[in-house]
Image: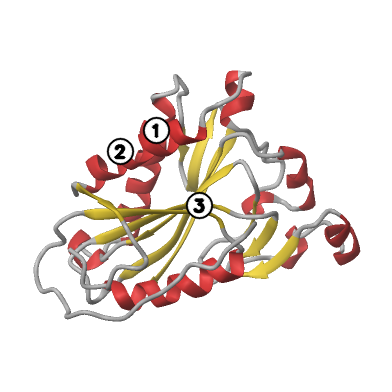
Amino acid sequence: MSQPLATTGFGSHPLTEPNGFRVWRPGRVNYRDAQTSQVDLVERRLHWTHDLLILLEHPPVITLGRNTNRNNLLWDQGTLQAAGIECVPSHRGGDITLHGPGQLVGYPIVDLNHYRKDLHRYLRRLEEILIRTLADFDLAGETLTGKTGVWIEGRKIASIGIAVRRWISYHGFALNIDNDLTVFEAIIPCGLPDVTMTSMSRELDRPVDKDRVAGALISHFGTVMQRPLLGDFDDSTPSTQT
């Protein structure tokens, strides 16, 4: 059952380097609720001394990035409704993509003022986090020149699309673990004709423990972003938590 991401108040603005990051895993969350809450969390990040990594799952939803070509949506509204797929405009960059159960979706709320305000460098770090996570499961992820995301032998396994407000990042990545790949027939994923989507379970031909994937990704997030894990984020704790 989907749930909204809750929000709380503000603290004072930190002037120093972030002291680490916290992790929030709220479960399955409606995309509209997650997007609305991220906007609030961006404002709250201005008053924290830590970054935040949200890891969650969405009900079936097609999201339209700011650069989406509507011709990349292949199914009409009736077909989408029959399949139980919502279609939602997104604040993130990039073209059209699809989320659903079985994906690990990550929304890092990160102060890029401490990463040289370099969006390309940040995207490359997200790709590196995903590649290292895949390697823990004996999967050789790679990047393709001129295309954001992660592939395995030309098949796309992870999509990335971010937004930035006041140099605080939001939105992020979606890693296919054991999601239904047939629903990608509804779109031209990321506007890339003839792209083949894949998942960890398909590549390994076996079930994959989602909690193990999340644990590996959290570890690599800390290593690549050079921030220690401070623990879980408690949405009932005042936003001054450090």
The reply to whether the C-beta atoms of the residues labelled 3 and 1 are less than 8 Å apart is no
* Quarter of the image where the N terminus is located: bottom right
Q: Is residue 135 left or right of residue 181?
A: left
In the rendered image, the residue lying farthest to the front is: 236
Q: Is residue 222 left or right of residue 143?
A: left
Kind of residue indicated by mark 2 = His
Q: Position of residue 39 (x, y in %)?
A: 44, 75
Sequence-first disc among 1 and 2: 1
**The residue tagged with tag 3: helix, strand or loop?**
strand
What's the CA distance linking mark 1 and mark 2?
7 Å
Which of the numbered marks, if any, corresponds to residue 220? 2
Q: According to the image, label 3 marks what residue?
A: 56
188 and 40: which one is in front? 40
In the rendered image, the residue lying farthest to the left is: 16
57 and 225: which one is in front? 57
Kind of residue indicated by mark 3 = Leu
161 and 232: which one is in front? 232
Residue occupying the point 21% across, 59% down:
115
Frontmost of labels 3 and 1 is 3
Q: According to the image, label 1 marks what residue?
A: 133
Check disc 2: other Cα within 10 Å, few if <14, some if 14-19, many if 20+: some
